[in-house]
Image (cartoon, rainbow, N blue to C red):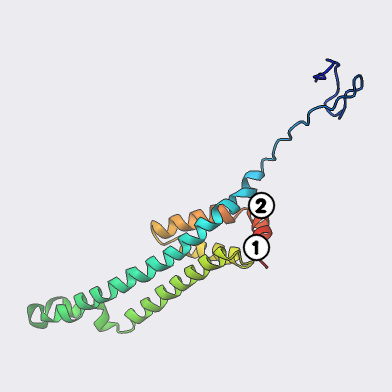
Amino acid sequence: MYCSACGQQIDQNQPVCPRCGRQTAAVPVAAPASSYFYVRVHRHIQTLSILWIIYAIYISFTWLVAVPFLTGFFGSWAHHWHGGYGFYGFAPFNHLPWLAPFITIALMGRAILSAVTGIGLLRRAPWARTLALVTAFLTLIKPISGTALAIYTLWVLLPAASGQEYDQIAVV
């Protein structure tokens, strides 16, 4: 490296030129490779939290639309077909009266878990990262939308550097 004023050769670490006393320009330090992970959580946490809330609404809405259809299809509609024969004997809600409430409770539980995850991440709660990881692992088997959201959540929050960054942005 050379001094820009007098042309004297100087060492990179010297703050001033030994010949003319002029300050040398500061050398920019390259960012460490882990800085990518350091800003990843901060950049994606808002999107991730909103997606979890939308996913909770999606779960609730699809089941609320499906229940009347399934009840009508397998219940009273099928009874009128063929004078009470046909699909009526195979209706799941007739032989298993506990099935619809069980599915409803399971899906609403999953919707509540997803909504709490989204709200916790939105508020930067200290426990929300752990809950999001657990919810993501539980949602991995839900085809397409659930799997995609779970993989996105794991990509953002699972690495150790992401945990350190989330701890820094968490509101205590």
Amino acid carrying label 2: it is: Ala
Q: Mark 1 Cα within 10 Å, few/some/many (few <14, many 20+)? A: some
**What number is the disc on residue 154?**
none
Q: Amino acid at mark 1?
A: Ala
Residue drawn at (59%, 63%) of the image: 129
Residue at mark 2: 161
Horizontal and vertical percent position of residue 130: 60, 65
Residue that label 1 marks: 170
C-alpha span from label 1 to label 2: 14 Å
**Residue 159 left/right relative to 95:** right
Q: Check disc 1 and report its element: helix, strand or loop.
A: loop
Q: Residue furthest top?
A: 7
Quarter of the figure with the C terminus: bottom right
> Could you tell me residue 64's position as x and y percent?
32, 73
Where does residue 50 sit, x and y in percent of width and height?
48, 61
Query: Residue drawn 50% across and 54% down?
Result: 152
Q: Quadrant of the N terminus?
A: top right
Up-down relation of residue 51 to residue 26 (above or below): below
Mark 1 or 2 closer to N-term?
A: 2
